[in-house]
Amino acid sequence: MSDPDAFQLGEWTVQPSLSRIVRGEPRTRPETGSEVRPEIRIEPRYMDLLVYLAQASGRVVSAEEILERVWAGQVVGEHSVYQAIARLRKALGDDSSQPRYIETVPKRGYRLIARQSASQSASQNAGRESAATPAPGEGADLPPPSRELNPGDRPPEERRSGARLGSWSGPLSGGARAWRARVRAHRRWIVPLALSVTLVCVALLWLAVRQGAAPEAIRTVAVLPFETLGDDQAYLYFAEGLGTELINALGQLSNPRVVGPVSSFGLPAEGTTPAEAGRLLGADALVSGQVLRADDHLRVFIRILDTRDGRQLWSRSYDRPLSDVYEVQRDIARSVVESLRGGVSDAEMARLTPPAPDILAAYDYYLLGQHYRSTRTEEGLRRALELYQQAAGTDPNYAPAYRGLGLSYLLLSYYGNLPLAQSQQLARPALDKALELAPDDAETVAVLGLWRYLRGEYGLAEHQLEQALAQRPDDAEAWVWLGLAMQRQGRLRDALASLEQARRLEPLSVLVAVDHARALGRSGERARALSELQALVGGSRATPQLERNLADLALESGDLAGAYRWADSALGQGERESASMAMMALTLACVGEADRALRWAERTLAKEFPSQSARDRLEILYQVLGDVAGLKGLVEIERAALSVDQSPDLEWRRVEALSGLSALLDGRPGEAARALEKALGGRTDAVVASDYDLVYLGSLAHAYRQSGDPRRAAQWLDRARQRLDELRAQGWDSQWLHYAAVRLTLLQEGVDAALVELEQWTSGWAVAAGLLANDPVLEPLRKDPRFPALHEALRAEEQAAWNQIKGQRSAGNAVRPWPCPQGATYSPRPTLVQTGGRRLKRWPTMNGSSASTWRSITRLSARPSRTRLRQHGVRMARVEKDR
């Protein structure tokens, strides 16, 4: 098979249309008599690059030009060019130190230096096509410039999608003569047509100017993760940190709006076109960068692409000593803003300048700490603490190090096993020091708002967070914390507005999406909440936190099999987190598997100190099972973590509320009333959550009634009913609110009204069956002859769900049957995964149409430990009998 577009490059014959190169004289195959020559296949993209270099006729072509012409604006960096050049050199047998084909011109680009000519087959084809083929030696040996190689001449849809370049558009040598002859033959009409087109364009431009038309403004920009160049990936955190710091600097300005780093960095590294990135991130422009750090030298290349048409709007490179990294950051931020909107004021320039440590090593520690803090795992947060401490120790006047230190302590109280009192005690001095060094730092003010939120000081937290957002409106985390503070005050609609703003800033962030989905669930939009979270499943975004919240939403929607699937998947992601174990325990309780549920609860409590998320789920679990001993044990764990001097008021109230529920379930209403009064008395904001607190209020009223104090019972019932009406007015429509309404109706209006309320509440809530069976407040309801039929229907749903789960388990792998999408099956063989320089086994693999959306091994460190491997889904030899 011949290629009409083939050309000779040194000793190689390049065949673009066939994506191959062949070398040497043909030899005859004895068995067939056909002629063959050694050949090497070339990837189409690399062949495009070779063709483009050939058409440059020895001209030096920059990496920027190659990205623009060959990759046609796709979101890739110079590293892709380096890799392509290296692959071509390897295929051609070339040596970069003594090049014979492709020469690297330092700081300029690349050029083809081998002699080029038309191949014999191409010349023969050209002779057949045209009788006017000149004699050999006449005219140029290279092809005419190909229209396909000019992105400006390609259809807009191809330019936007990053379509690959084609091969030669015309034949070589003799074909070139024919091509030129055709051009001369049509010159008579080309010139008048060009003049006509020019006049039309001038007229349209004049009309546009008259009508005040202007190019569409760049309203939103996303900064993609900066790439590290070269073989040494040890400085990956440094490149990532530079990109994050650029986002933080641009976020100081109101125009253009900047997409948050979590979403920007969550895009696939290769193959995403500007149009796709713009759609996913809601961005009009993309800023990408490449960083080369070698010893004490720093080289940074930045460019901006328009996501609407793939055009490159601006590019620049910086070659500086490493000690000038802060100047480079400032120059990049200023240049980016100027290119997007035309100018930067002196006041804005001052806000764009990042705080610089006196000692460069402190900045290294800080950036690496930022990297680990973003993991939101206990291990990652503890590593971040060490790095922030090293940064502060290296430069005691570097404020961001103290801010990171304080925030990591606070996050460990939720994501780790650090008691809240201890985290508050450790965080506050660090935050005070950060504020002393940088009094106007909005990020530190926001973290102080979080500190107050965790103490239950929701009004003060809201005030400080609003102050911070006035300076830094791009801080997605601060918007989330503000939304949480508003929820605890019962203002769900305001909270949703704040969380939706956070979603606009971070559309792909799991952390933001989870809190937004929780708020949507409390407003009754559970289907939308599930849809938003399910859209994030797959790749590196499938975190245990995401899957636990999917399990929660599935329970609220009555999907018991789905809840089990997500709970099991969260467990399978790695070394057992207490929150994931508690989620599995609660799910098993909801399908009637009490013994298995209690075994998982025991494993959860065996942790040094279960996380707050785990303890919240265990509180619900013990109510579902009516387990007095379990509640008592949980009370003791909570009480042991209290500190007389350091624990905030909210923590004491939480322990008293839990103690009151335990006493009420144990038949001690007087003791329950005293404990619940301590928890709720004198407080208007939530102790746990606004809707869940209605359960405490109803329990307190019932405890007073049972202990012979109807007056106090009536007072608390009135307060509970008033609070219920307030929450409904604020848009609350959660399952806990409906459940609390049934209890209040029973206490105020009797069994008949409560049954009506219960029948109207057709929620499918998986938790309801256990609560209805064991809640002491609902005892009059259980004595009614109409109740058993309703409760038996709920239990039948539980049994059907468990049968479905068991059936799906037996259809899967014997060791790990879940998670498995419907229609997918498990392969009995492990697959080998190359990562971090090591070959790892991944077991099991999934085959099926849905399997591509499920998790793969990602984010492994260069030297993964056994613990790290377990955290990312690598199978270890164990059999889990309780699932």
Image: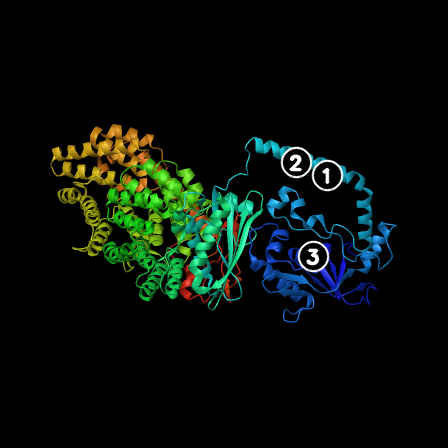
Q: Secondary structure at mark 1?
A: helix
Q: Could you say which is closer to the camera, residue 525 or residue 344?
A: 344
Give left or right: position of 632 versus 203. left
| Nearer-N-terminus badge (3/1) | 3
Neighbor class of circle 2 (other Cα within 10 Å; few <14, some 14-19, many 20+) is: few
Distance from disc 1 to disc 2, alpha carbons, whole Å, reads 10 Å
Q: Could you say which is closer to the camera, residue 628 or residue 207?
A: 207
Residue that numbered label 1 is attached to: 194
Give left or right: position of 808 versus 74. left
Residue that numbered label 2 is attached to: 201
Callout 2, which amino acid? Answer: Cys
Task: State if disc 3 and disc 2 touch (CB < 8 Å).
Answer: no
Compared to 820, does 753 lie above or below?
Answer: above
Q: Quadrant of the C terminus?
A: bottom left
Residue that numbered label 3 is attached to: 56
What residue is rendered at 80% in x and 39% in y? 188
**Residue 345 in sight:** yes
Name the front one of labels 2 and 3: 2
Q: Secondary structure at mark 2?
A: helix
Measured as percent of width and height from the top left, residue 439 is found at: 29, 52
Callout 1, which amino acid? Answer: Ala
**Residue 558 in sight:** no
| Nearer-N-terminus badge (2/3) | 3
Neighbor class of circle 3 (other Cα within 10 Å; few <14, some 14-19, many 20+) is: some
Q: Secondary structure at mark 3?
A: loop
| Nearer-N-terminus badge (1/2) | 1
Measured as percent of width and height from the top left, residue 315 is found at: 54, 52
Callout 3, which amino acid? Answer: Ala
